[in-house]
Amino acid sequence: MAAAWGTVISTATGAGATILGILVGTMAGRRNEARQWSRDRTIAAYERFLQSFGAVEIGLRHAYWEERVPQGIDWEEWNAALVSVSLVADSGTGMAALELSEAIGEFSTFPFGQPKDLEKLRQIHQRLDSAQRNFVQAARRSLHAADKQQVPWRLGGPPPWSEIMEIHQRDQDTGHVIP
């Protein structure tokens, strides 16, 4: 009879350990799956925000160069992209998104339809450029905790100031607006 109890205890211990292993594995798997889902949503929100920024910035820039009131800018998409970022961003990335949003807000209140003021344009361009780079860096830090390096390049966003001046010069030389 003692051997039978030994077998029962041994079997029960093995079954208990197996069940415990399954529960721990399931919990760990769900946690990893939730982390991956959250990371994917964060990346999608950051991408949407940067795409919307590019579209709004280009629309405002074209209106400024053409000396007309901005039309066709999708402000609803811009605000939806801001909300998406606010749902997933850490505090550093959220503050960088706010900085970029404020720069866009400043540009959107320029006196469109009037002659160009290159000094004002230079100031807003620098703010847009800096804010866009700050957002990208903050987003990268939030997504890649181990990768704290600044990237040595900037893609997208406002063109370099040298291109702005070149466009302005061509506009002055030809009398045509080149968007």
Image: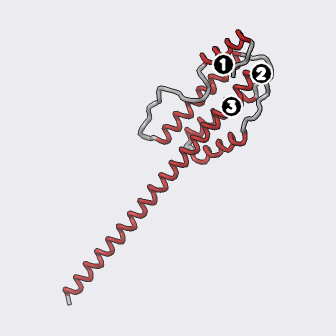
* Quarter of image, res 65: top right
Q: Is residue 149 visible?
A: yes
- Is label 1 or label 2 in front? 2
Please say if the residues under marks 3 and 2 sit with CB atoms less than 8 Å apart.
no
- Image check: 21 left or right of 50? left
- Image check: 145 left or right of 104? left
Circle 3 is placed at which residue position?
104
Residue type at tag 1:
Arg
Mark sitting earlier along the chain (1/2): 2
Q: Look at 37% across and 67% down and name the residue there.
A: 22
In 3D space, how far apart are the residues under numbered discs 3 and 2 (Cα atoms)? 18 Å
Q: Is residue 139 above or below residue 175?
A: below
Q: Look at 23% across and 82% down and name the residue there.
A: 7
Q: Determine crowd level at label 1: few under 14, some 14-19, many 20+ residues with C-alpha closer than 10 A.
A: some
Q: Determine crowd level at label 3: few under 14, some 14-19, many 20+ residues with C-alpha closer than 10 A.
A: many
* Quarter of image, res 147: top left
In 3D space, how far apart are the residues under numbered discs 3 and 1 (Cα atoms)? 14 Å
Q: Look at 70% across and 9% down and name the residue there.
A: 173
Residue type at tag 2:
Glu
Circle 1 is placed at which residue position?
122
In terms of secondary structure, where does tag 2 sit? Answer: loop
Residue type at tag 3:
Ile
Q: Is residue 24 above or below residue 139?
A: below
In terms of secondary structure, where does tag 3 sit? Answer: helix
Please say if the residues under marks 1 and 2 sit with CB atoms less than 8 Å apart.
no
- Image check: 141 left or right of 171? left
Q: Is residue 167 above or below residue 148?
A: above
Circle 2 is placed at which residue position?
67
Residue nearest the observer in this picture, 10 or 153:
153
